[in-house]
Image (cartoon, grey):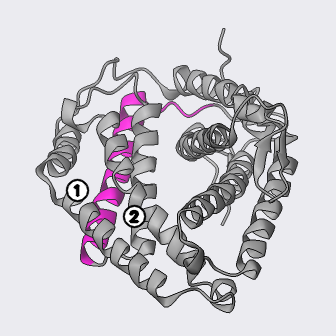
Amino acid sequence: MPRTPFCVVSSSTPPPVPAISVTDAALVAVAQRRMVLRNARKRFLSAPEPDALHDLRVAIRRLRAAIGLFGPAIVLPRRSREDRLQRLGRRLSRLRDVDVLRGALTSDEALASGVVPALLERLAAERMTAAARAERTLRRQRTKRLLRGLTRWERRPRFAMATDQVIGSVLPRQLQERAEAFAEHPGWALKIRRDGDGRLEDAEKTLDRDGLHDVLHQLRRRAKRVRYELEIAGPLLGRDEASAVDYLRDIQDALGELQDVRVIETALDELGPTEQPGGPFRHWLRERRYQALERWRRLRRKRGSPVIAFAADPALPRVP
């Protein structure tokens, strides 16, 4: 459903940036995403399934994006700052990797290749252990203090700037800086090829295989962060961020698929010969990687230009 515009103007006249105060926008953005995180945590603790884990991790990242975007304006309690949220998200990453591996090894392609039942049983046990660790992390006092601190801040917020400062004087600068940093990320310049086994390698031999994947993973995380920030800023500024967000989502999907294949193959490399899935499964993984790499190559040609275009909207105040 298309967003209702803030005002109706002729196509030749850019709409003005709404005179919303930075402090009001920050308070609403953080409060909304804190509530989503609260609900996602509650859902996961009641049923720690993969979908609940996904929603929980996304909620953490979206809240981090809101806090980061309005960082110059807000003063949060020490225990509720972004680095604490980042640490919480990292503690959930092991469970996510197990879910990726289990999903691959219970696929039709894996079952047709003769996955050893004992391997699936061991993965199920690992999943239970990782889920129990995640639950303990979410129930520990440090996590509760983090969430309580955000709730208290919403009731009695503290800010680092005057309440009459409007978003037009802050957000365009933030977005322009984010867009430029995104376009300058070293991941864009990588020249990637596949070796004899179909695995990715740096054509210029500057990075080893792990280093190559690490740079691509960092670029993917940057794309997610910028996407979540644009989803906050676009409606506030009365601008249509859909094109840039769709582009960033496509980057997430392509690089995310490459990362998932990396996680799966790394785990398979640690298995004994008798536990290895058959050749058809490896072929399926190679095809997944090939398709994701081709998608990434197409997206790479734009080098972040949809994001740059959004941040360079002529109706937005320019950064000197």
Place residue 203 in its image quadrant: top right
Q: Tag on residue 137?
A: 1
Q: Main secondary structure of the magenta part?
A: helix
According to the image, label 2 marks what residue?
95
Task: Locate residue 54 relative to residue 103 in the image: left or right.
Answer: left
- Choose the circle earlier in sequence order: 1 or 2: 2
Residue 253 sits inside the magenta stretch: no
The location of residue 230, given as percent across then percent down, is: 59, 42
Does residue 14 appear in the picture of this structure? Answer: no
In the rendered view, would you say 227 is above or below 316? below
Task: Assign a secondary structure to mark 2.
Answer: helix
- The residue under the point 41% across, 41% down is 64
The magenta stretch is: 17-46
- Return the residue nearer the eye: 128 or 164: 128
Q: Measuring 66% from the left and 67% from the top, which residue is drawn there? A: 1
Is residue 44 on the magenta stretch?
yes
- Label 2 is placed on what type of residue? Leu
Position of the C terminus by quadrant = top right
Identify the residue at image location x=65%, y=31%: 16
Left or right: 36, with 20 as reference point: left
Relative to 67, does residue 291 appear above or below in the rendering?
below
Mark 1: few/some/many CA within 10 Å (<14, 14-19, 20+): some
Q: Position of residue 70 (x, y in %)?
A: 42, 30
